Image: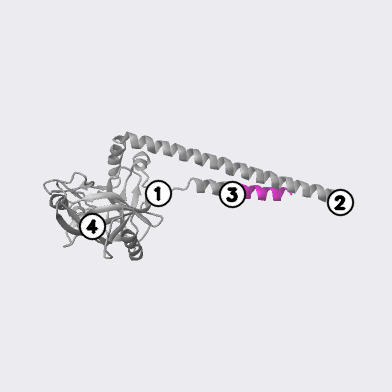
Amino acid sequence: MVYRIKKYFAFIIGVIIVCESMINETFAIDIELPDDSVYASEEEQDKLFQLIIHNSADNVKYTDNGEIKHEINDDGWIEKIVKESIMPVYTFDVFEYARSGDIIIERKNGWYCITREFEDGTYIGDSLFEIVDNVCYMHGGTISKDYYLRKVDDDSTMMGNFFDCYNYDLNKEWLINVLKEKNMGEFDDENVRFVVEKQRKAFYYIVNTEKGGVIANARWTDRNNNVLGKVYYIEDFREVAKKIMENNPRALKKEEDERKKTDKNKKEKQIIYCVVAGLFFIAVIFVLFLRMRLKQKKNY
């Protein structure tokens, strides 16, 4: 009898521990990253390309090969989206890194980045988009200086980050050169992820370099076409992360409110698990007690 009680008690304690570990599970990632490449798989790119063309919430009329004709100020031109450029968007919790030093990189569910080009292949910019229930929603992005000067310099309604560049091929060439100059190692496509932190700052996170993880601003240029952007070893980036956090008090408050809400939900779940486990334990003891009493009556 005592042995059985101990056995059931150990089982219940084990259940509680497992449940608590599930509640507190984190997805801190350092050396290994989800997926196989900075790019989406070919199958995923094909599917997303078709959704953009045929199921856009913005009612943009694309041709089957992803081209669209613009007409502004009697000047018509054709631009196209580049299927092979589609990258999943990952989140980098800069606030958490500033606080604890934990590198938390997760795939931002349903979010991607795609590059746009002129008909002749000239880079236009990049668009961030989200897929919800098989519908594509565009969420802005970047505009090249060339596009701005040639097409929309007098269009006050145009939105975007002028002169920024999220395109991986263009960033890759720049990154290779910068890392080589700084003796920071080499990388392959499978070691890179495109990350956007909470303030929409875009980075590339690189792992498995010769001297550890590297994070780099997505490349951008000033009005004189000077290529800008900074590259850090991940441990050196923590001071930058702290400044980002300090300079965004509203976002920090919102994040802390969300954290408190999450912690509250975790505690409520823990209480529920403990109550259920306790009731189960009491029920087991009660059943064993009844069985013991019945056995004693039979012996009489």
**In terms of image quadrants, where is residue 36?**
bottom left
The residue that mark 3 highlights is: 15
Amino acid type at mark 2: Asn
* Residue 134 image point, x, y percent: 39, 57
Determine the CA span between mark 2 and mark 1: 60 Å
As for residue 199 lying within the magenta part, the answer is no
Local crowd size for mark 4, using a 10 Å CA cut-off: few (<14), some (14–19), many (≥20): many
Q: Give the residue type that dot 3 points to.
A: Val
Secondary structure found at label 4 = strand
Q: Quick check: marks 4 and 1 in contact, CB under 8 Å?
A: no
User: What residue does disc 1 label?
Assistant: 28
Residue identified by numbered label 2 = 299
Residue that appears at 50% across and 46% down: 23
Q: Earlier in the sequence, mark 4 or mark 1?
A: 1
Main secondary structure type of the part rendered in magenta: helix
Q: Which residues are magenta?
A: 1-14
